[in-house]
Image (spheres, rainbow, N blue to C red):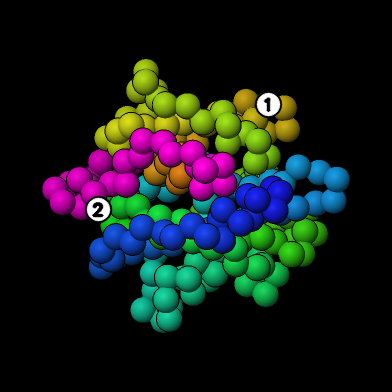
C-alpha cells in the first residue's frame, strides 16, 4: 500500500447504520513486510460451528457488555481469536457499517500489525478458528460477482473471492466478508462498486445466509 492508499483510508468517512442489540465488529489486519507485498489476515472457522462453519472470514465477534465500544470489541476478539494483542497494532481507520443476514450491525475496523513476527506464530482459538491465510492485497482485484449463485446468499449483488492457500485452491470468501473486502478495495482505489449493506435484512427481520 502506497502513501496515496493510506491517505484514501485516512480520509474515508464511514457510513454509520443503526446499531442493534447484537452488534459486532471485525478487524482487517494488514501486515507490511519489507520487500514483500502487503497481506491481509483471514481465518477459517471450524467445520463444526453452528454459524458460517468452514468459512473464511475476518477476525471478529459480538459486542460484550464489558466492552467500552465496538472498537474495544474488535481488539478483544482479535486477541482471543489470533493471539495478536492490541498493542502490536496501529488503527488505520474504519469502513462503512453493514448488517449481517440476521439483521445485526457489523462494524469493520482496519489496522496494521506493527510486530510482523506475530504472523509466524498465531495462537488461533481452537474452538473457532481452524486455519489462517495471508491474502496479498492484490488478490482483492480478483473479487467477482457471484452471478452463478455458487453460494446461497440473499445479499445482492453478491460477491466471492477464490482463496489460494500456498498455491492450492482452498475455498472462497463470500457473502458479508466478500462485500466488506470489496468495499475496502474501493476505499483504497477510489472506485465505487454496487454493494448490499444489508439494510433489508434488518428491515424485514429475516434470517438468511450472508
Residue lying at the far right of the rendered structure: 35
| Residue 145 counted in the magenta span | no
Task: Pinpoint residue 101: horizontal percent, then vertical percent.
Answer: 28, 46
Residue lying at the far left of the rendered structure: 204
Tag of residue 168: 1
Is residue 93 rendered to the left or right of residue 1?
left
Is residue 172 rendered to the left or right of residue 16?
right
Circle 1 crowding by C-alpha within 10 Å: few under 14, some 14–19, many from 20: few
Task: Pinpoint residue 112: horizontal percent, then vertical percent.
Answer: 66, 60
Q: Residue visible at 44% across and 60% down? A: 13
Q: Looking at this view, is 129 or 3 the one in front? A: 3
Give the residues in magenta.
185-210
Q: Which residue is mark 2?
A: 103
Q: Residue visible at 47% across and 27% down? A: 144
Q: Is residue 88 above or below residue 140?
A: below
Q: Is residue 28 above or below residue 93?
A: above
Q: Quadrant of the C terminus?
A: top left
| Residue 202 counted in the magenta span | yes
* Residue 121 appears in the rendering: no
Alpha carbon distance from label 2 to label 1: 34 Å
Circle 2 crowding by C-alpha within 10 Å: few under 14, some 14–19, many from 20: many
- Looking at the rendered structure, the secondary structure element under dot 2 is loop
Q: Looking at this view, is 140 or 169 the one in front? A: 140
Amino acid at each position: 500500500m502506497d502513501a496515496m492508499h493510506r491517505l484514501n483510508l485516512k480520509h474515508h468517512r464511514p457510513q454509520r447504520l443503526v446499531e442493534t442489540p447484537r452488534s459486532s465488529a471485525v478487524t482487517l489486519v494488514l501486515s507490511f513486510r519489507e520487500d514483500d507485498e502487503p497481506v491481509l489476515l483471514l481465518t477459517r472457522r471450524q467445520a463444526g460451528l453452528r454459524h458460517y462453519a468452514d468459512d473464511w472470514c475476518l477476525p471478529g465477534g459480538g459486542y460484550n457488555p464489558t466492552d467500552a465500544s465496538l472498537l474495544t470489541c474488535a481488539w478483544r476478539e482479535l486477541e482471543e481469536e489470533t493471539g495478536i494483542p492490541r498493542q502490536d497494532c496501529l488503527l488505520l481507520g474504519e469502513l462503512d457499517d453493514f448488517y449481517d443476514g440476521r439483521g445485526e450491525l457489523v462494524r469493520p475496523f482496519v489496522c496494521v500489525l506493527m510486530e510482523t513476527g506475530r504472523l509466524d506464530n498465531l495462537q488461533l482459538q481452537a474452538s473457532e478458528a481452524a486455519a489462517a491465510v495471508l491474502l496479498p492485497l492484490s488478490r482483492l482485484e480478483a473479487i467477482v460477482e457471484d452471478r452463478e449463485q455458487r453460494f446461497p446468499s440473499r445479499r445482492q449483488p453478491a460477491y466471492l473471492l477464490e482463496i489460494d492457500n500456498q498455491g492450492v485452491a482452498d475455498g472462497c470468501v463470500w457473502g458479508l466478508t466478500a462485500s466488506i473486502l470489496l468495499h475496502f478495495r474501493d476505499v483504497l482505489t477510489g472506485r465505487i462498486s454496487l454493494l448490499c449493506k444489508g439494510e433489508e435484512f434488518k428491515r424485514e427481520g429475516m434470517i438468511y445466509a450472508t
